[in-house]
Image (spheres, rainbow, N blue to C red):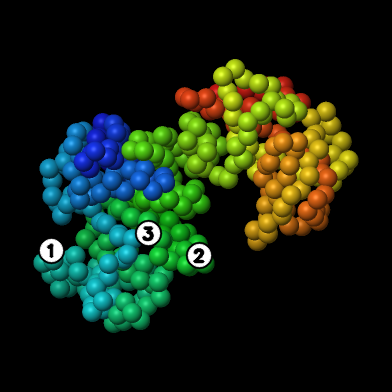
Amino acid sequence: MYVSLSNIYKNYGDFQASKDVSLSIEKGSLVALLGPSGSGKTTILRMIAGLETPDRGDICINGTRVNTVAPADRGIGFLFQSYALFRYMTVFDNIAFGLTVKKVGKEEIRRRVTELIDLIGLSGLEDRYPSQLSGGQRQRVAFARALAPNPDVLLLDEPFAAIDAKVKEELRMWLRNTIQQIGITTIFVTHDQEEALEMADQIVVTNKGRIEQVGTPQEIYCNPETPFVAKFLGKSSVVEGYDVLKGFQKIDNVKEALIRPEYISIHPQGSLHRYRSVVELGYIEHILFKGNRLEVTLRIGELVLVANHTIDGHAFKVGDAVDVLISRICIYDDNATYLVENEGMNTSSLFYI
């Protein structure tokens, strides 16, 4: 593996920021460190960069242990959340800064900076100052500056936190495509699930200083291995007494279940004839317009669930009685999660994940 962390521990006084963290990252991959605030993801990033030193454990880059190697000698490019561009330097000089510090020749600096300005699509803006750029343009300049010294690994600390939603969406795809084009190993920190799912080749979910799960976006979302990951990813309804739902039986020692919106379909009352034996009667309590879909809150007996509905589907309104079909639920105990298929729809009902 190109970047590896082995049995890493890091304390800040009484606070344990990293607890036995082990992680392997392949060369050229784009990896997201995803978790809530205080989960340890930024500590991992800063230790790889050399801005923090682990109390125990080893960090290796390209087979070399770097625990005692200075940050400047690790071959790391770091993009800060705030961009940290120099206000009184032009676009050209900002990008050239790292090369200038390393005393690279002027002709090589000009060649490299020109190459990067073309890469980020800002040709013609070399002489502008940060205040003359949009937020998205400043982000691209900061990205180019991090790449200028040809680092082996690129680290990004919440790279889109300061950008508005529309520009953020465009920059995500631009950054992913650019990183793939360059082929540089990249690790970024985010608390934005959509960002991680959309951009990353691999997601590392952190919680209370530990790594909960590592996998592809699809693996993490569809097959959560721990209760925390199941609850953290997506927008789920947590329900007790899940066995009152048709097609689901009580599993020993499992009290709660998660039901994601995509596990639920809603139909006009009396219109759903297939799987009739497991259709629930529900009542719509709230409808929220989400642009490309409707988020529908509905009640089935004492249970309140959230489902998605297409904007061009049947025009439901609050108070409507509806047919509800729940295809699966995710149940969990203290150690693992299980996907349970509706027995009335599938003969194979229990999948350990």
Which image quarter holds the N terminus? top left
Estimate how packed mark 2 is, as few (under 14), some (14 to 19) or many (20 or more) residues with alpha carbons within 10 Å. few
Q: Along the polypeptide, which appears first: circle 2 or circle 3?
A: 3
Answer yes or no: do the residues labelled 2 and 3 have beta carbons within 8 Å? no
Q: Position of residue 163 (x, y in %)?
A: 43, 66
Q: Position of residue 289 (x, y in %)?
A: 68, 59
At 40% from the left edge and 72% from the top edge, which residue is drawn? 135
What residue did someone put label 3 on? 159
Tell me the quarter of the picture where residue 206 sits: top left
**Residue 180 percent coordinates (x, y):** 40, 53
Mark 2 or 1, which is nearer the eye?
A: 2
What mark, if any, has residue 165 been given in the picture? 2
Q: Look at label 2 and name its amino acid.
A: Ala
Earlier in the chain: of badge 2 and badge 1, it is: 1
* Circle 2 SS class: helix
Q: Quadrant of residue 18?
A: top left
